[in-house]
Structures are given as C-alpha cells and as structure tokens.
Amino acid sequence: MWHIQECCEMNKTRFCNLLRLHDEDYCFPNVLRNTALNHNLGSVVEDRRGCLQLCLTEVANGLRNPVLMLHANDHTHRMFVAEQVGVIWVYLPDGSRLEEPFLDIKSIVLATPWIGDERGFLGMAFHPNYKKNGKFYIYYSYMDKKQVEKIRISELKVLASDANKADPHSERNLLELEEPAANHNGGQVLFGVDGYLYLFIGDGGKAGDPFGKFGNAQNKSVLLGKVLRIDVDGRSPDGKPYRIPPDNPFVSDPKARPEVYAYGVRNMWRCAVDRGDPVTKKGRGRIFCGDVGQNRFEEVDIIVKGGNYGWRAKEGFECYDTKLCQNSSLGKEEASCRMKRQETGKSGTGFQFGHLNLKLLFFLHFHLGELYFMSTSYPSAYAPHGSLYKFVDPARLVTKDVFNVKFLCNHHTFSNYHGRQNSKIKIISPCLRF
C-alpha cells in the first residue's frame, strides 16, 4: 500500500532512519516506551518476531477528497460519506454504496481542482432527533451573485418518501459569513450533549490573521476565528433563524456577538465529542479540537465556555504577536496540548506529508466502536483518489465460519474477508505515528 518493505523483512536501523519521527517516546519495535502513554493503548498484539499487528481494511475507494463520514444515530448503521465537491454518499452495512447520492450540491459548492484548496463541502451533523424530524446541518463554501466568497451553514431535511435521499429544496440558511481569503474556512459542525449546535469557524485566512488591531480571532464582535453555539430548535426575537442559548458566555457583552462560545481560534478543522468513561461517564461531553498553527505549533484543545485559545496573540506556547501577547485585556488563554512542528511535517489537523505517498485527511470513530480514517493519494477536490479505511484488530481476524483469513506479518493481502472476495487487509508499519 505504501511501497515500503514489511517491518520484519527490513533492517531495523534502516527502517527507523527512513520513517522515524524524532520523539523519544517512540522506538521500533516496541513503538511506545512511555508507560503513561502506553497505558491508554489497550491490548496491542505483538508476534513472535516483535512485529506489531495493526491492520486496516479498505472500505471504499474512488472518492473525490472525502472529508467526513457520519452515521445518523437512527439504528440503520448506514455510513454517510461526503466528498469535498459537495456530494454525500450512503454506504449500507454490507459495505455497498447506493447508486444515487444522498445529497448533491456540487453546483452550489465552491471547490476547485487546485491541490490543497481548503474550500468546498466541509462539515455535516445530524440532528439529535434525526430519526423523528429528519433534519441535518451542512457547512460549505460558496460564491454569491456578487462574486463574494462566503461560508454557509444550512439546515436540510430528508425526503419523507425516501430515507436515503435528502430534499435539496428544503435548505434553510442559518448563517452566512464573508470569507476575506480562500483559506482557513474551518468546517466542523457538531451537536454537543447539551443539544446545541457548535460551529467552528476559521480566522478568515491569509497568514497571521492580519485583520485589524486584534485580528479576527481575538475580536469578539466578529464571528471569524470562533467557536459558535446556537439553538437550532427555534428562532430569535430579532428574526435570526436560530436562538441564542441563554448561558452563552458573552450574551451580556455589548461588544461581543452572542453566538460566540469560545475565541482565539485559528482554523479548527475537525473536532470530536468525548463519549466518556463507559462506566462512570467521566469526561462525557468534552469537545476536543485540533487547531492548526502558523509555523511552529499545532494544538489539541478542550473547548470550554468563554475560552480564549490564544491566536493570534500566541501560537502554541509562544508569543506570535508580541504586543497582543502582553495585552492583559484579552483575557486568560486556555491550556492545551501543543505539538511543535518538525521537519517531518506533523499537523494537528488535516494532512501529514512524509515519506509515504498517502495523505491522511482525518480519523473518525463510528458508533459501533470502529475506528476509521480517510486518505487520498492526490489532494484535489475533483480527483477520485480518496479511500476510506477501517482499522482491524488482528486478534479478532480469525473467527470460525465468519472469516477465512490468515494473519502473516510479511503478507499484505488476505482473501474472503467477511465473505467478500478480494478484500484487502493492509498492515500498518509499527514505526509509523500519525
């Protein structure tokens, strides 16, 4: 898959010199040496020759820059996979894809063939009560009649006559924001455990958030560079197609937009809601986001009400704008996990480019407990080179009457996986860290 020799067939020193990341906690063949980090990995199987058996299987391919996969929490176990061009496909539990898309708005979505263009269809979330009301929410780039680039967040409904087709005529625009540049469009949209819709908006683009005295991200009177929180189950008295949650942190601040839940955001592209400890529920509802840095640091942030995540005053641990960094009126910056950039090209959100020909778009967690990731060999919105992979636990590969596979450390292809001929299970190199 990645045109590298299998771990057990290659000299260890050559292998790690080729692919190693300069982190002291990682070392071949054991990968993790730090017991604190290793504690959360669970059981990772290692064979007699010290090769970690971490595998994946291809679920779908031929996708045009896949940007997300979701389930509707309606007990159908369907997967909804969206392409950057603005097409959403339905995959059934048996892995087959329906011929007609769930939604096709590529004629509206602003996307180009340019490599690395961040615009396009960027986010989607199903209403918590989707099974009954059929509502879902989308986030995309578009060009208005005056040729102004904008972000649009809309509500749509599924067709009453067909659960696998959205009604394109049901679109209700909730929010539109003018984008001053082509990049930093944000894109995450999700429902919190409180039932409110959270929107993660980029800072407007260019480099260094050069918009005004404080930049967009530190200016609470604009919505760019923010985490927004709205109630989509009603309308506000002033005519907005949504309500403002009464406990939003800045509802009483005349200089702030009431939608703002957190600020100091550069470009939060993907986030996730913590499902909590399965027994105690501790941590349930926490929102984790990756925020991509300018030049030196990437961040993983836990979103809190009223939180300031530093940009553009700070990038990671360090001051980015010296004057803003010393401005006490901006408020306290929230603590986060930061990763310093290195020559290997780590990125907290989105792509990682290394020695491999695969561009990892993002990871995702399905409601059945499965872990997936999406990738492409050519990061263009119109290039059909995207794939969806599922991680496979090799300890569970051989199951009587269900699987006819044999795990071998130096083989790439297995036959008759889940009874489907020519399915492929790939081995992830034990020295790779995503």
Image (cartoon, helix red, strand yellow):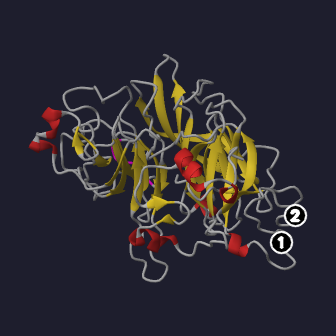
**Please, what is the three-letter code of the amino acid marked with disc 2?**
Asn
Q: Position of residue 95 (x, y in %)?
A: 78, 57
Binning the other alpha carbons within 10 Å of mark 1 as few (below 14), some (14 to 19) or many (20 upward) gives some
- Residue 403: mark in rendering: 1
Taking 5 as reference, is 322 above or below it?
A: above
Going from N to C along the chain, the mark reached first, 2 or 1, is 1
Q: Is residue 398 left or right of residue 309?
A: right
Work out how far the residue at label 2 is from the one at label 1, CA to CA, in angstroms.
7 Å
Q: Position of residue 58 (x, y in %)?
A: 74, 53
Residue at the farthest right position:
421
> Is residue 397 something that shows in the picture?
yes
Q: Are marks 2 and 1 in contact (CB under 8 Å)?
A: yes
Which residue is tagged 2? 416
- Let me know if residue 236 is in the magenta part: yes
Residue at the image position 41 percent from the left and 27 percent from the top: 179
Residue at the farthest bottom position:
279
